[in-house]
Structure formats: C-alpha cells, structure tokens
Amino acid sequence: MELHSLLSQDAVRIFSSTTSKKRLFQEIGEVMETVSNVPSGRAFDALQERESLGPTGVGHGVALPHARIAGVEHVVGVFARLEKPLDFDSVDRLPVDLVFALFAPEEAGVEHLKALALVSRTMRDPALCAKLRANGDAATLHALLTDVRATRAA
C-alpha cells in the first residue's frame, strides 16, 4: 500500500480560516463528498463519533482522524494543512496544523490498519512535516506526500 493510492490530488487542501475541530471535520466532509461521493454529513458524523472515543492528535502538530464509513469502497485519505493551528487535545498539548484523515469501508479490517500505520509512519517524519508546513500549494503538498521514496524512507 502506498499513499498515492489513498490520496488524490483533489483531496489535499489548505484551510486558512478553520476555527474549530468541528468546523474542520465539516470541511473534511465536504472534501470527501467531492472526491468519493460520500455525503459530507455522513463523513462529518463518522469523524465526530470516532473523536468522541479519544482525541486523534498524535503530537508534533499532527492529527490523524479516521473512521469507518458506509459508502466508501476502499480507504480514502484527505489531507489538510491549517494556516491557523487548532487545539486537538494532542498527547503533547501542541496545536495541530497538519491533518491526515482516513475513511475506510465499514468492513475493512487489515486494510484500514495498514493505511493508518502508513500514514502514521509518514507523518512522523520531521523533515517531511517541515516541507509540508513550508509550502502553500496543494499540488506541491500532494507531491510531497505521495513521493514513493519519501514515504518508504519515513
């Protein structure tokens, strides 16, 4: 599994005015509707429900919200760089500015876990995160995330 199979260029966004986790999840839901035809409200509800189980902020300014959702045929990712970091109740208490959301089919077991592990490994790379924070172009962010050499090295 590689990130380019999870993340389309249309699913990479830069949000400049997101003011809350709830609003972020609404915006991610809107992106999901665009890239996978899953109703935005269903994606939003799934993220909210998962977040109620425990925060998905993993530290170092990164969050990995994820959910299983009806209507998704394979694991789909949405990446967002936030210009205004948000409190995500992260383990290190740092605000989040890099968000990689994953949506998996309801029946996906191993596929969902493999995708989550891949994204987690990738987003733990401090050099990659620095490049993501330094770029303001969604196409560049997509290229950085889906570069096979970079994701294998992470």
Image: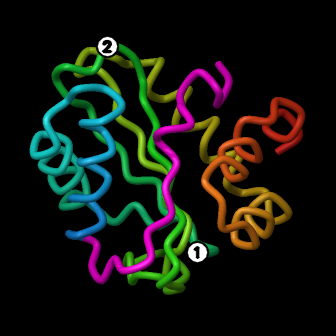
Question: How many residues crowd around disc 1 within 10 Å: few (fewer than 14), some, or many (20 or more)?
Answer: many
Give x and y (percent) for residue 66. 36, 44
- Magenta residues, start to end: 1-21
Where, by quadrant of the figure, is residue 73 drawn? top left
Q: Is residue 89 above or below residue 113?
A: below
Viewer-proximal residue, 152 or 110? 152
Q: Residue at x 26, y 15 (%)?
A: 107
- The kind of residue tagged 1 is Gly
Q: Quadrant of the image for the N terminus?
A: top right
Q: Is residue 21 left or right of residue 13?
A: left
- SS state under label 1: loop
- The kind of residue tagged 2 is Glu
Q: Quadrant of the image for the C terminus?
A: top right
Q: Is residue 3 magenta?
A: yes
Q: Is residue 54 above or below residue 76?
A: below
Q: Which mark is residue 140?
A: none
Q: Which mark is residue 61?
A: 1
Comparing labels 2 and 1, the label whose residue is closer to the camera: 2
Q: Residue at x 25, y 48 (%)?
A: 30
Q: Residue at x 71, y 57 (%)?
A: 124
Q: Residue at x 67, y 54 (%)?
A: 123
Q: Coloured how? A: rainbow
Question: How many residues crowd around disc 2 within 10 Å: few (fewer than 14), some, or many (20 or more)?
Answer: some
Name the residue carrying label 2.
73
Viewer-proximal residue, 45 or 55? 45
Q: Is residue 101 magenta?
A: no
